[in-house]
Amino acid sequence: MPTPDFVLALREKIGHAPLWLSGVTAVVVRGDEILLVRRADTGEWTPVTGIIDPGEEPAVAAEREVLEEANIAARCESLAWVRVLPPIRYPNGDESQYLDLIFRCSYVAGEPFPIDGENTAAAWFPLDAMPDMSDDMADRIRVALLGDVATRFER
């Protein structure tokens, strides 16, 4: 589902006004490969991203998004980066800004396949042969791959 129901309900009340949301980026690693999805809206290759549902633990949200978007079971290993993304204005006029929590995740099971319509492809890529992507997404991957910090996750 591209836009969560709770966001649609908020939009009914606030229209296009700026909305502060919490999001996750899941950098899923399997050996020397990385899971990437090709976004249906832009055609760009990215790690899995998504919005945290109200009351949902961020690590659980990252794992859920990977399963929903790419058919891959993954487990969060560490929280690599916490940052605020620049404000976004969508083509329909909606404005949002995200607190993005970037997780390094390990592969558990599954074959990549785009499930929920947000992506047109899901695939493993060698870390040294990833497709072209934005500097922002490449930075998220780079920081997650540093893997030098352990984080406790509530479940």
Image: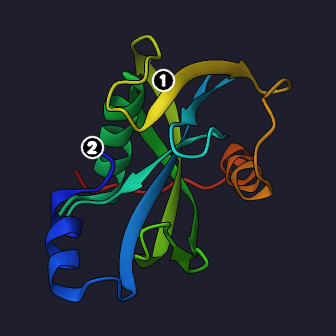
View extreme (top): residue: 111
Up-down: is 47 above or below 80? above
- Please state if 64 lies on the left or on the right of 22 as rendered: left
Up-down: is 121 above or below 147? above
- Name the kind of residue labelled 1 in the image: Tyr
- Please state if 125 lies on the left or on the right of 129 as rendered: left
Q: Which residue is mark 1?
A: 107
Q: Quadrant of residue 125?
A: top right
Using the rendered image of the protein, determine whether residue 28 is visible from the camera's viewpoint: no
- Name the kind of residue labelled 2 in the image: Met
Q: Quadrant of the N terminus?
A: top left
Q: Nearer the viewer, residue 29 or 137?
A: 137
Q: Residue at x 23, y 87 (%)?
A: 14
Q: Position of residue 54 (x, y in %)?
A: 18, 67
Q: Earlier along the polypeptide chain: callout 2 or callout 1?
A: 2
Which numbered dot is residue 136? none
Q: Position of residue 105 (x, y in %)?
A: 50, 38
Q: Nearer the viewer, mark 2 or mark 1?
A: 2
Q: Nearer the viewer, residue 130 or 94?
A: 94
Q: Residue at x 58, y 41 (%)?
A: 47
Q: Which residue is mark 2?
A: 1
